[in-house]
Amino acid sequence: MISNESIENIKALIDQENEKDSNNHINYTIHESIEFLDVLIENVEGKLNTTVFRKPAAEPYILPYTSNHPRLTHSNTIYTALLRGIRLYSDVHTFD
């Protein structure tokens, strides 16, 4: 776990960088988790866990079989979704 002193040091460094150039400003929030790209990273008792982050407005990875796409496209959609999950989940139990 990050101590309050470490957090204050990080905030001071970011504030110092913000004062150097008025055109660049770094906003920060400190939480136990963060969504970055399509990954949710959580700090659970000092261990970082990663899972797939699903944006609420994102469309699901479903391609209707009645669509006029080649069969390879149908199987590839499922394959890439599973591969993405394997790459992003930090442990097997979460993936299951």
Image: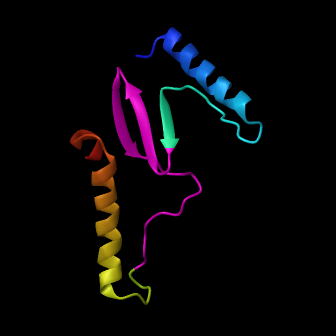
Magenta run includes residue 63: yes
Scheme by which the image is coloured: rainbow
Q: Is residue 1 above or below residue 55?
A: above
Residue furthest toward the left? 92
Looking at this view, name the residue that lies furthest to the front. 20
> The magenta stretch spans which residues?
36-64
Residue 85 covered by magenta stretch? no
Is 25 above or below relative to 79?
above
Report the number of discs. Answer: 0
Q: Position of residue 2 (x, y in %)?
A: 44, 16
**Relative image position of residue 84 (x, y in whole percent):** 34, 58
Q: Nearer the viewer, residue 77 or 50?
A: 50
Q: Residue at 35% across / 20% down in the picture?
A: 45
Q: Quadrant of residue 57?
A: bottom right
Between residues 25 and 67, which one lies in front from this camera angle?
A: 25
Horizontal and vertical percent position of residue 96: 25, 46
Residue 68: image location, x then y, percent: 43, 90
Give the image quarter of residue 48: top left
Residue occupying the far right of the picture = 22
Residue at 57% across, 51% down: 56
Q: Quadrant of the N terminus?
A: top left
- x 35%, y 88%: residue: 70
Q: As drawn, is 28 to the left or to the right of 86?
A: right
Q: Quadrant of residue 26?
A: top right
